[in-house]
Amino acid sequence: MTRIDGRENGELRNIKITRNYIKHPEGSVLVEFGDTKVICTASIEDKVPPFLKGLGEGWITCEYGMIPCSTITRKPRDASKGKVDGRTMEIQRLIGRALRSVVDLTKIGERTIWIDCDVIQADGGTRTASITGAFVALVDAINKLNEQEKFQIYPIKNYIAAISVGILNEEVIIDLCYEEDSNAQVDMNVVMTDAGEFVEIQGTGEENPFTKTQMAKMMELAEEGINKLISIQKEVLGDDCLLIGTGGNLTN
Ligand code: UDP
């Protein structure tokens, strides 16, 4: 059975990553997973949260938001009355954990890298697009720091990307759009590195519990999809992503 947008079960949407998308932050990317579009930025601040003060290491943290007209029905800015709602909190923590997992924070000194993911158009998979795009913005921010401060720091251990998989009409599918996501029996988000190691797996079959066999099939599709996303990251970054071990340390 073909999907609503004509894709095969294991086919990703059209993926696009545009670097240097806005002017001010050190790293900025527009990431597109089909109609889902997220601006991911990475900005560097020369201080760390109090719990890390004096330890000589840095921190990476994330804020996530959706602009009012990113969703089908306009979502007013004050919908949460100034408070961060549960979904937003969950997503921003997930993005922060994912990025921290691939960075040696001792190599960035006492700095905080702020990742901001702003969804400008939501059509399912905003958290997975955010992680995939934010990684590229993070690499660019570290390159900018090296350029500005004449450092040579290579704190990135691995590439990282994320994708959604799920079960709809008993079929295991990848990269669900909103219509698929809202009708899916099972919804799962997978975060994986280029070493094939999983950093986070969020799977829910609240009304339709899933079997180990179905999970294995979802994981197989997720792994294939993430490998494709990482190839795209590698393609857009070219020689600009030097991983840890390539040489170089914080020089001053
Ligand atoms: N969505 C929405 N309004 C909301 C939250 C979600 O319209 O307040 C839509 C949006 O298209 C989003 C999709 O529902 O991408 C799936 O949301 P979910 O919470 O599963 O997160 P996502 O798949 O975006 O990571």
Image (cartoon, grey):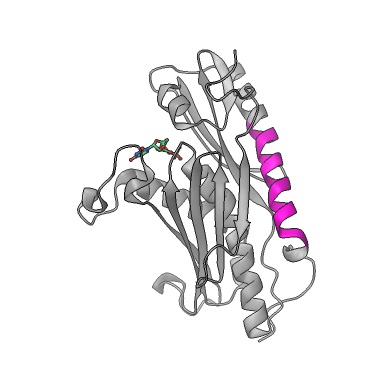
Q: Quadrant of the C terminus?
A: bottom right
State which region is magenta: 222-238
Does 33 appear in magenta?
A: no
Side of 106 relative to 248 (left or right): left
- Residue 194 seen by the camera: no
The percent position of residue 150, horizontal first and vertical second, equals 68, 84
The image quarter containing residue 30 is bottom right
Q: Looking at the image, which residue is at 67% across and 80% down?
A: 147
Q: Main secondary structure of the magenta part?
A: helix
Q: Looking at the image, which residue is at 52% across and 30% down?
A: 176
Task: Please state the quadrant of the image where ligand 1 appears.
Answer: top left
- Residue 65 seen by the camera: yes
Residue 68 vertical position relative to residue 112 in the rendered view, above or below: above
Front-lying residue, 35 or 99: 35
Does 235 appear in magenta?
A: yes
Side of 166 relative to 140 (left or right): left
The percent position of residue 76, horizontal first and vertical second, equals 25, 48
Q: Looking at the image, which residue is at 58% across and 43% down?
A: 162
